[in-house]
């Protein structure tokens, strides 16, 4: 490469003998300024002789204001014009894009050769060059361009300058990536310059992985004002290795072991000056062998047959299985707790009751816990799987970092998994980035108890530690929340779900809200009466599926949903921090253990044209019939002109003061 540059240099210098030759040269090479001798300082070649001109930037220390990895600044002065990877790039949208070169001496600079772009396209259109003679940066005369169109530019400076450093500034538009292959500047040592030590490059740092224990290191050295008379490789630090060919440019290293070893290349010139550069070799241990990280880990299923519990899906045996009870509900799930963060690379899902029976699951997917919700692992969602295909194998597009994995079975009536194998390795990395759950909006979630409308607060993803209050909101007997096909929330759902059409309400809500839909899938049939056991099971699902503050779980319902709510609040008072019934239609005081409600904070709402005595009589009864002292139930809020409809429950749910009160209630603060 040096010979090629010298030939190019000699051709250009011969053309400097006449002004016409200079103009022709500039036209051919795309220079910005014609060469001239009128009034210009004689070039260094006239003072020191043509043969003394050298590339003073070659392998000199280079630094940059910013660099786009892996295109480092030293690649712009390494003499390599052939490799597309050997260039400096600062990246786009960086307002300051400077490359500084320390000449490691004082030189009279005559001309430059600039090679830019990517292969034969995308030259740097606009640039400036500066020099520093020890008193600060100054423009390099005649070196700047504003409309360059060539990837190779040769420019003889309009004035010879004496410099210790050179700076290249890319002034292209910020959306362009300045691609600088080589900046060669030719000159001669300044008169009176002392001997310049060699410039040494020991080569790039190396990384190995056992069982590889040997490597070759290739360095180089140049001397600006003489020749390199000797080279010597030595080991500076790290596990001891065996060295061979220590006095040549290429060092052979053998017997490396785990750790980082540093090797030094020292060069000495013909005047006795020496300098060195160091290179490191890092040896990593044999990679961990991937193993089945799900084997014998804790497993939990949404529902499981007593004879086929979830644990049998991770016991290492293909003759046992997890099996769900017969059910017409879809989206059952099997969770595996990996008991720590793991990198999971692939999975095997063995289905049916044996490898040869046609009871495989037609629709399923794998999900990973994201720190705040479950996310489908790309490439694992399967629809239309043949019943005879009992093995599904997945190699993930990238390792999944997680501590829990879930199999979602979308089928009815049975889900059968003989074994879930997850191939991976433990990870010391703990994710800290924000989670990516669907927050600040109401979405649809499929669940084996009840499909539901879900709202996560707008700030839910901001961190991975905050736990949020949870509100379970039940619609009435004739109401609903989701469309028939379960792909969307109804345009006008009944109950609390309706309020999320308001952007201001969404911004104000600081709780997770789950609004179950009591309607059979695909028909929206059913009488709307919620099963208390299924709602409580749905609550347990939510605690597994979101970051729920277990001390602040709340229940609300309207009409028939309020009736169900009273029944649940009586039987599972310990699960809820407060209860909000709206437009009650039953008499819960006749239920067994109704006095369990006395310490539970309750705020009831009723329409004046409905039957407000239903709610007010509950408070009177709790205050007088369940022991000494008043109950924790508040006075009932009655809307005088409202009836048994939206004018009552929509008004109540739109009252922000309700949530100010509700979210202050805690299970731990109850007597």
Image: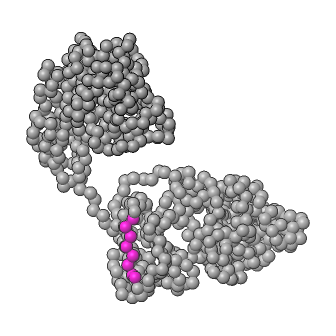
Classify 484 as above or below 396: below
Q: Residue at x 33, y 79 (%)?
A: 317
Is there any visible trace of residue 615 in the rendered image? Answer: no
Classify 622 as above or below 526: above
In which image quadrant can residue 244 be found? top left
Front residue (pair 339, 493): 493
Outermost residue toward the bottom? 357
Image position of 661 (left or right of 410): right
Front residue (pair 133, 285): 133
Q: Residue at x 17, y 46 (%)?
A: 215
In which image quadrant can residue 347 be found? bottom left
The secondary structure that dominates the magenta segment is strand
Relative image position of residue 351 (x, y in whole percent): 41, 80
Front residue (pair 657, 12): 12
Relative image position of residue 653 (x, y in whole percent): 76, 62
Residues rendered magenta in the picture? 389-396
Whether residue 423 is in magenta: the answer is no
Q: Quadrant of the N terminus?
A: top left
Is there any visible trace of residue 284 in the rendered image? Answer: yes
In which image quadrant can residue 43 be found? top left
Front residue (pair 318, 627): 318
Relative image position of residue 572 (x, y in whole percent): 64, 71
Relative image position of residue 10 (x, y in whole percent): 24, 26
């Amino acid at each position: 490469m040096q010979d090629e540059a010298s030939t190019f240099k000699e051709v250009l210098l011969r053309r400097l003998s006449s002004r016409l030759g200079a103009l022709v040269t500039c036209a051919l090479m795309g220079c910005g300024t014609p060469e001239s001798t009128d009034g210009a300082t004689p070039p260094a070649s006239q003072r020191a002789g043509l043969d003394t001109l050298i590339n003073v930037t070659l392998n000199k220390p280079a630094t940059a204001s910013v660099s786009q990895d892996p295109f480092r600044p030293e690649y712009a002065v390494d003499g390599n014009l052939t490799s597309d990877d050997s260039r400096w790039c600062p990246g786009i949208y960086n307002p300051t894009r400077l490359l500084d070169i320390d000449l490691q001496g004082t030189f009279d600079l005559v001309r430059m050769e600039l090679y830019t772009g990517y292969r034969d396209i995308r030259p740097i259109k606009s640039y400036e060059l500066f020099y520093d003679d020890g008193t600060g940066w100054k423009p390099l005369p005649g070196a700047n361009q504003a409309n360059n169109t060539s990837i190779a530019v040769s420019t003889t400076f309009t004035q010879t300058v004496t410099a210790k450093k050179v700076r290249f500034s890319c002034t292209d538009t910020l959306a362009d990536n300045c691609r600088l292959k080589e900046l060669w500047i030719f000159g001669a040592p300044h008169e009176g310059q002392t001997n310049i030590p060699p410039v040494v490059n020991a080569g790039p740092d190396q990384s190995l992985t056992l069982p590889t224990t040997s490597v070759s290191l290739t360095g180089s050295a140049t001397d600006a004002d003489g020749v390199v008379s000797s080279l010597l490789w030595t080991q500076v630090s790290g596990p001891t290795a065996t060295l061979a060919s220590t006095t040549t440019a290429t060092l052979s290293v053998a017997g490396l072991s785990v750790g980082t070893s540093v090797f030094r290349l020292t060069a000495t010139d013909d005047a006795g000056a020496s300098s060195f550069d160091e290179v490191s070799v890092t040896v990593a241990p044999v990679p961990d062998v991937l193993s089945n990280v799900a084997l014998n880990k804790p497993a939990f299923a949404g529902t499981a047959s007593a004879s086929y519990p979830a644990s049998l899906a991770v016991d290492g045996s293909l003759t046992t299985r997890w099996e769900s009870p017969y059910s017409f509900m879809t989206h059952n799930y099997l969770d595996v707790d990996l008991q720590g963060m793991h990198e999971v690379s692939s999975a095997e899902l063995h289905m049916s009751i044996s490898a040869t029976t046609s009871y495989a699951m037609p629709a399923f997917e794998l999900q990973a816990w994201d720190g705040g919700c479950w996310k489908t692992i790309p490439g694992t969602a399967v629809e239309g799987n043949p019943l005879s295909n009992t093995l599904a194998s997945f190699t993930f597009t990238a390792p999944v970092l997680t501590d829990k994995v879930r199999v979602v079975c979308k089928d009815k009536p049975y889900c059968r998994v003989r074994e879930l194998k997850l191939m991976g390795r433990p990870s010391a990395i703990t994710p800290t980035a924000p989670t990516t759950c669907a927050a600040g909006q109401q979405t649809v979630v499929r669940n084996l108890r009840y499909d539901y409308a879900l709202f996560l607060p707008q700030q839910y993803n901001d961190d991975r530690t905050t736990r949020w209050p949870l509100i379970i909101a039940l619609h009435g007997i004739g109401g609903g929340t989701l469309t028939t096909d379960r792909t969307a929330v109804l345009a006008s759902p009944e109950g609390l779900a309706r309020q999320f059409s308001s952007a201001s309400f969404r911004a104000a809500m600081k709780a997770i809200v789950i609004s179950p839909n009591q309607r059979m899938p695909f028909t929206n049939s059913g009488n709307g009466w919620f099963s208390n056991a299924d709602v409580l099971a749905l609550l347990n699902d939510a605690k597994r599926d979101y970051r729920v503050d277990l001390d602040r779980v709340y229940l609300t319902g309207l009409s028939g949903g309020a009736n169900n709510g009273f029944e649940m609040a009586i039987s599972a008072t310990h699960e809820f921090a407060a209860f909000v019934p709206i437009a009650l239609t039953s008499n819960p005081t006749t239920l067994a253990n109704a006095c369990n409600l006395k310490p539970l904070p309750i705020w009831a709402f009723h329409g004046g044209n409905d039957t407000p005595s239903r709610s007010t009589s509950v408070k009177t009864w709790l205050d007088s019939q369940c022991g000494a002292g008043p109950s924790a139930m508040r006075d009932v809020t009655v809307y005088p002109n409202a009836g048994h409809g939206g004018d009552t429950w929509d008004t109540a749910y739109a009252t922000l003061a309700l949530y100010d009160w509700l979210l202050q209630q805690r299970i731990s603060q109850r007597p």
